[in-house]
Image (cartoon, rainbow, N blue to C red):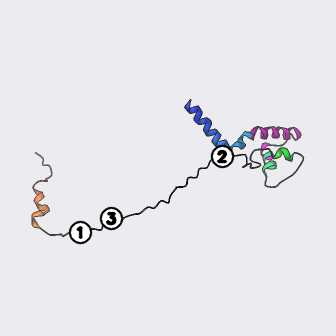
Amino acid sequence: MKKIATIFLMLIFLFGSTEAYQLLKLPLLVQHYIQHRSEDPGISFIAFLKIHYNKKLVIDDDWQQDQQLPFKTQQSANAFMFGFVSMPSHPISVQCIPPPFVQKTFRIEKNPEYSFTLLQDIFQPPRLA
């Protein structure tokens, strides 16, 4: 049930706030193509699309029907948009306090007691028996 409700709400949002509602006009495109096909049996679907979606504006006898095709016009007034504006009631100030600077000095001494040669007795390669 939750999945169906989620899909339903997503479809409402998709068709309401984007141009996806134009996809609902696809049956009109097919119907208009069939009408053109009955008038001219040699017209292909690509030629039909070139006639109706070319950049040139051609006003002919079926211009009103052409304007109802999908993605032919933008009807943003019919689409509702979701927008939320939240203003804080008082200004927010953020202060970054830098951490205190501590300077440490390190001395490097050459002490023979800490030589790597002392470790020679501990780490030895394995010996064959």
Viewer-proximal residue among 31 and 78: 78
Viewer-proximal residue among 126 and 79: 79
Judge whether residue 46 is colored magenta: yes
Q: Residue 33 location in percent, x, y? A: 81, 40
Could you tell me the amino acid type at mark 2? Ser
Distance of mark 3 from mark 2, alpha carbons?
48 Å
Q: Residue 32 location in percent, x, y? A: 82, 40
* Residue positioned most to the front: 89
Describe the element under mark 3 as helix, strand or loop: loop
At a point 82% along the width and 49% down the height, the residue shown is 51
Q: Which residue is mark 3?
A: 99
Q: Residue 97 location in percent, x, y? A: 37, 64
Highlighted range, magenta = 25-47
> If you read the primary sequence from the N terminus, does the residue marked by circle 2 or circle 1 appear first?
2
Distance of mark 3 from mark 1, alpha carbons?
15 Å
Q: Which residue is mark 2?
A: 17
Could you tell me the amino acid type at mark 1? Lys
Q: Which residue is mark 1?
A: 104
> If you read the primary sequence from the N terminus, does the residue marked by circle 3 or circle 1 appear first?
3
Distance of mark 2 from mark 1, alpha carbons?
60 Å
